[in-house]
Amino acid sequence: MEDPEFRVVLTGAAYSGPGALRAIRAVTGRSLWQSRWLLDSAPVTARAELPFGAAVAALRSLQEGGVQAALCCEYCERLLPTDGTPVDPGPCASPYWPTAHCRANSETVCDLDRCPSHDPDRLRS
């Protein structure tokens, strides 16, 4: 099963000083001028198509620099709350990722008859 990818979205800055710009530069690899433009253009995508672990690491770096940021699931286009609370239980838009296994979802019951994450035989067929 294909894992969803995530976007890191800049939502604003609590403090738009050098620390925020350094954090954006470190995460995006862009120049100082481009980092300033990203910060001023919020909400805007800073990084896209990242696996969950890399997206969380980028999010932490931005938040430590004083940048308000969030993760957005590429499949269902929902923002993941940073405080660990679940988002609405609506269906994930992915044809490959079961709703209950979407990291942007609060459902705990799988919506497939035979769940591939719990039934490896389904992946082979």
Image (tube, rainbow, N blue to C red):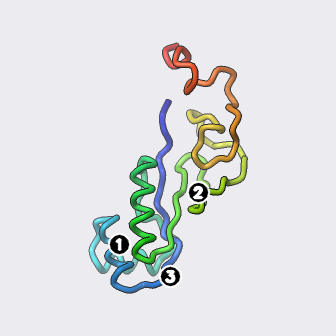
Q: Is residue 7 above or below residue 23?
A: above
Please tell me which residue is depicted at 39% across the width and 66% down the height of the picture: 61
x and y, in percent, of residue 4 in the image: 50, 43
Give the secondary structure at mark 1.
helix
Give yes or no for contact between labels 3 and 1 (Cβ–Cβ under 8 Å). Answer: no
Please tell me which residue is depicted at 42% across the width and 72% down the height of the picture: 64
Chain-order first, disc 2 or disc 3: 3
x and y, in percent, of residue 76 in the image: 60, 48
x and y, in percent, of residue 98 in the image: 62, 34
The amino acid marked with disc number 2 is: Leu
Give yes or no for contact between labels 2 and 3 (Cβ–Cβ under 8 Å). Answer: no
The amino acid marked with disc number 1 is: Ala
Pointer 2: what residue?
80
Please tell me which residue is depicted at 71% across the width and 52% down the height of the picture: 88
The amino acid marked with disc number 3 is: Ala
- Spatial CA span between label 3 and label 1: 13 Å
Give yes or no for contact between labels 2 and 1 (Cβ–Cβ under 8 Å). Answer: no
Left or right: 114 as drawn, with respect to 46: right
- Spatial CA span between label 2 and label 1: 20 Å
Mark 3 nearby-residue class (10 Å; few <14, some 14–19, many ≥20): few
- Spatial CA span between label 2 and label 3: 19 Å
Pointer 1: what residue?
23
Please tell me which residue is depicted at 30% across the width and 68% down the height of the picture: 26
Closer to the camera in the image, 20 or 64: 64
Give the secondary structure at mark 2.
strand
Residue 14 marker: 3
Closer to the camera in the image, 78 or 14: 14
